[in-house]
Image (spheres, rainbow, N blue to C red):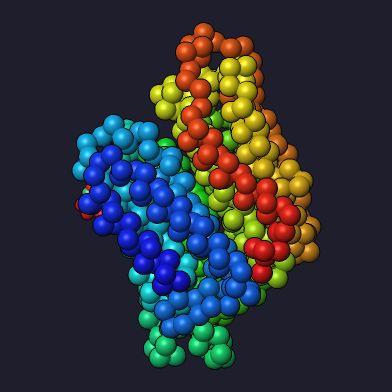
Amino acid sequence: MLMIIFAWLSILPTTLLIPQKLLWVTSTMQSLTIAFLSIAWFFQQDFAFSNHLSLLDNLSGPLAILTSWLLPLTLLASQSKLSKEPLIRQRLFIANLTALQLMTLLTFTASDLMCFFIFFEASLAPTMIIITRWGSQERRLEAGTYLVFYTMAGAAPLISFLAALYSNFGSLSTLLIHLTPTPSLNLNTGLFWAICNMAFLVKMPMYCLHLWLPKAHVEAPIAGSMVLAATMLKLGGYAIMRFSTLLPEPPLTQTPLFIFIAMVGIIATATLCMRQTDLKALIAMSSVSHMNLVIAATLVQTQWSYTGAIVMMIAHGLTSSALFCLANTTYERTNSRTMILLRGAMLILPLTTTWWLMTLLSNMALPPSVNFYAELLIMTSIFNWSTMIFLLATLNLIFTTAYTLYTLWSTQRGQTSSHLKTLFPFQTREHLIMIMHTSPLLLLILNPTLISM
Ligand SMILES: *[C@@H]1O[C@H](CO)[C@@H](O)[C@H](O)[C@H]1NC(C)=O
């Protein structure tokens, strides 16, 4: 753990000192080393590793590896756009991006709840800097403001809950609190649960609290979008599961409202996807839809649903980040996120179409994929809980298929228009990004228990 953190910190001096020619190569190589080192966490039995500072278990282990894996990918993906900027801006960008992902990793692995809270909030600053300074459109300031205000407002109840917990126990270590009996707070209601988890529900984001997300995604540079989709949203789900042992368990009769909101959210955002013309907004909406399924799973609170939630978070992290990369490669060439402009790209770039097909199909949860495994677990536990809600969730399957086909159709098929004939082919770097996204997805099919609880 410490080794990884030090390796991570060593990127910061590199970015500031190394000569311009070697800047991207060295930082990418360093981050690749970190990514491969982090795989070693898989070989620890059950991720059992903890001390008073950091904690790796079945819940945080896979997410920590995902975060480390994503670092070289974000650096690779932002290279072409950024290498045209002034040198100092490139250095600051890499430094900020590294800091952001380090914060996320520390949030996942913190064993003390106060540390967790501090890193959780601290990751907000680099995110906002990346969106507002390196975003390419004028509305990025508005997006940054939305992001900060939503998150900050959600965090206020959380800090008071943590303070109350500390005055009850005298400690905020996750390990110790497990050993003590559940707190004698007489507030066993679903509403109490929701208020304590407000910070995480905003981060996930739950439907109704999700308005900041499409804005942030549309305005952010590619690295920002990737980090947001792949790890920042997962912070919420991870925290809800981590806190569920501390909070008094809400009786299930009191949570239908939230499950209902999540279900309506899944369906509403999936139907919205079918009417999107903006590629990035579509992917953001589809993330909201998937994350609401995770919220429903964490509310059901069974072993299966938790396993489903964690597998879903990993699978969706990789898939949505891959989709953003694909959207970005076309954005860099056509300077437009409008899907219709890409119509007929299949004839010109067949290999790219293969990448699109692979990622879109796993986003849709086609059977052998890990996403399907996750959805199966979540759907079964929802069915066990209530048949009505299950029926709502099955509607989602139809809509998801519909918008997947819509995306594929409007970006790849159809009449090839003449402006596409001058399109640059994919670079090796872009193929590498896609390979590094899809190979973990494919390999996990062989052994999905690696990331289940
Ligand atoms: C992030 O960027 C800002 C300005 O762009 C800079 O002032 C700050 O030092 C950077 N943060 C890190 C951790 O390098």
**Residue 15 coordinates in the image, percent (x, y):** 28, 51
**Residue 201 coordinates in the image, percent (x, y):** 50, 60
**Residue 316 coordinates in the image, percent (x, y):** 59, 50
**Residue 11 coordinates in the image, percent (x, y):** 33, 56
Residue 25, image quadrant: top left
Residue drawn 60% across and 73% down? Answer: 44
- Horizontal side of residue 135 vs 332, given as left or right: left
Residue drawn 63% across and 74% down? Answer: 46
- Horizontal side of residue 63 vs 381, given as left or right: left
* Residue positioned most to the top: 418
Q: Give the position of the N terminus as an image quadrant.
A: bottom left
Residue drawn 42% across and 88% down? Answer: 171
Q: Front-most of 102 and 311?
A: 102
Can residue 421 be seen here? yes
Residue 435, image quadrant: top right
Location of residue 80 with respect to 169 vertically, above or below: above
